[in-house]
Structure formats: C-alpha cells, structure tokens
Image (cartoon, grey):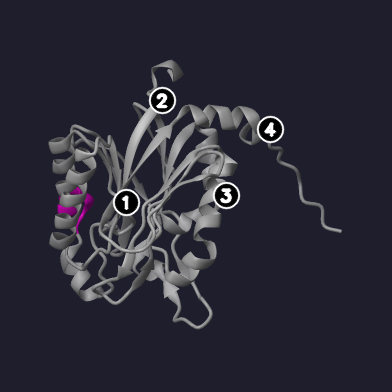
Amino acid sequence: MDDLRLVNLKLAMGQMCSGDTHADNIATVTALAAEAAGQGAKVLALPEVAGLMNANRKVALTQVSQACDDPFIAACRNLAAKHGLWIHTGSTPVTAPDGRFLNHSTLIDADGEIKAEYDKVHLFDVQIEGQAPIGESKRYAPGNALVMAETPWGGFGLTICYDLRFPYLYRTLGQAGARVIFIPSAFTVATGRAHWEILLRARAIETGAFVIAAAQSGTHADGRETYGHGLAVDPWGRVLADMGEGAPKVALVDLDLSLVDKARAQIPALTTGRDVPLRRV
C-alpha cells in the first residue's frame, strides 16, 4: 500500500473572511478554487465556517440545513468536479439531531464525490480575560468520532480549530498513519497572537505529519474578528507558509510526503510511548 501512495502533493490553502450568507461565500470559494486549480494544485484546503459565519441564531436557523441539502457543500462538490480538484471544505454549520448545529467538515475528491465527513469534537467554550464568554456548545452539538480518510497521498486526518488543544487526538491520527492533518480554523485575535503558531508546530512535530491550517481573517459581517495567518507546517516543525492577515487569497505549498516517514524514523515517538500509572505522593 505504501508503495502506491503519491509522494508529492501541491496543495493550496484558501484564506477567507466568510460572510453571513452562503451565496457570498460560494462566490469567494469559486474564485479560490479557480485560482488554486490554475496554479496546479491538487487539493484546496478551506478554513473553519467557510460556508457560513452568522452569529444571529434566528437568521441562521433559516439558512442551515442537513449536510445532504447544504448549498455550500453542493457548490464545493461541483467545483471539485469542474477543476479535478480535491477540496477540504474547512467546515460549515449543518443541522444536528438535537436542534443545534454541527460544525461539519467534508473532504471531496476530484470527481466531486464525498470521501469523508467529520464533526468538530471539541467545542470552544472559553472565558478569555477581558472578553465576553464564548460558548460554542450553546449553538453546536459535538461530534463523537475522529476521522482519517485514505487518499492517493495516504491518510488525511480531519480536525477543526479548538481540537488543536487536545494533543491525544493528533497522536491517535498519527498512529493511524495520517500523513497530512487538517486544522481549519477561525481563531480569535487574542488567542491567535498567543497560541496559534506554537500549537500548530507542536502538533506537526509530535505526529511527524504535515499540518495544514487554513484560517479566517478579518472583521466579519456578523461583527466577529479572526486572526488569519493560515499556516502550513512540515513534519519537522518548519513553517512552509504563513498567509498573514487579509482575505480572500490563496497560498500554494509543495509537500514532500517522504518527509513524514523520515521524521517518524528519526524520532519514533508514535511507537515508543508508554502508558504508566499516576502515583500521587
């Protein structure tokens, strides 16, 4: 199986300042996909809530549907087929069985077929000093499973934003063989400045995988501000691309996937870990 996997991957990250309607965001992604394909990318990675960013729950309830009926996912499938481009949608809200939403990610292959779906497991319920509390779980239900998709380039691990702060998720994906791990995000400015790069580099180093973290950037229609700085990191922790601030735009990175095996051979932390009991003294 390993001998059949492609070693080189030209990947595009799309940075967005998503709006509060599907139509506006579909228009943005249409342009990003055309640019990515025109530059030879085989995969386009989008940020969290790429499809819809609307804090007005009353209005959002009229916009959000089941994943099978979601207009943003449908548009991404059409764009993937049109350009022969794999698209990782980042995420978009879809309806959950309990009346809340799911922060839902979709990996679409170059034929426009859905290869994998993932719902954000860890929800952003925080209290940052000097800011109003953020309670994502009031609007969103959590996912209940990790997902890794097999692709021509090997395993792609799917996570979203706040998942980044839970290292055991990434260790599990690394041990399962993920070569590329997506962390689409809409980081706040305060937490982005303090934690964004260091956490992404740590996740890449500890898994020996490429980390692809497309990001939201700017002041959004619903009033939120996001940090930007979409980042691609290699398995040794080196930053391959930092998209800075501003959107929309595309950054291309060439991934040499043989570096995954090289990093894991040099530091075999995924296979030499030990589970030991805690002793209280």
Q: Residue at x 28, y 73 (%)?
A: 55
Q: Regarding mark 1 in the picture, which secondary structure is present there?
A: loop
Amino acid type assigned to the residue bearing label 2 in the image: Val
Label 3 – label 1 distance at C-alpha:
21 Å
Give the number of the disc on residue 121.
Answer: none
Residue tagged by mark 3? Answer: 202
Residue tagged by mark 1? Answer: 90
Give the number of the disc on residue 7.
Answer: 2
* Residue 68 falls within the magenta-colored stretch: yes
54 sits to left or right of 166: left
- Looking at the image, tell me whether mark 4 or mark 2 is earlier in sequence order: 2
Label 4 – label 2 distance at C-alpha:
25 Å
Residue 160 showing in the rendered view: yes
Q: Position of residue 279 (x, y in %)?
A: 82, 52
Amino acid type assigned to the residue bearing label 4 in the image: Thr
Image quadrant for the C terminus? bottom right
Label 2 – label 3 distance at C-alpha:
23 Å
How crowded is the residue under tag 3: few (<14 C-alpha within 10 Å), some, or many (20+)?
some
Residue tagged by mark 4? Answer: 272
Q: Position of residue 175 (x, y in %)?
A: 55, 34
- Looking at the image, tell me whether mark 1 or mark 2 is earlier in sequence order: 2
Q: Nearer the viewer, residue 201 or 79?
A: 201
Amino acid type assigned to the residue bearing label 1 in the image: Gly
132 sits to left or right of 220: right
What residue span does the magenta drawing correspond to? 65-73
Q: Regarding mark 3 in the picture, which secondary structure is present there?
A: helix
Q: Residue at x 38, y 71 (%)?
A: 138
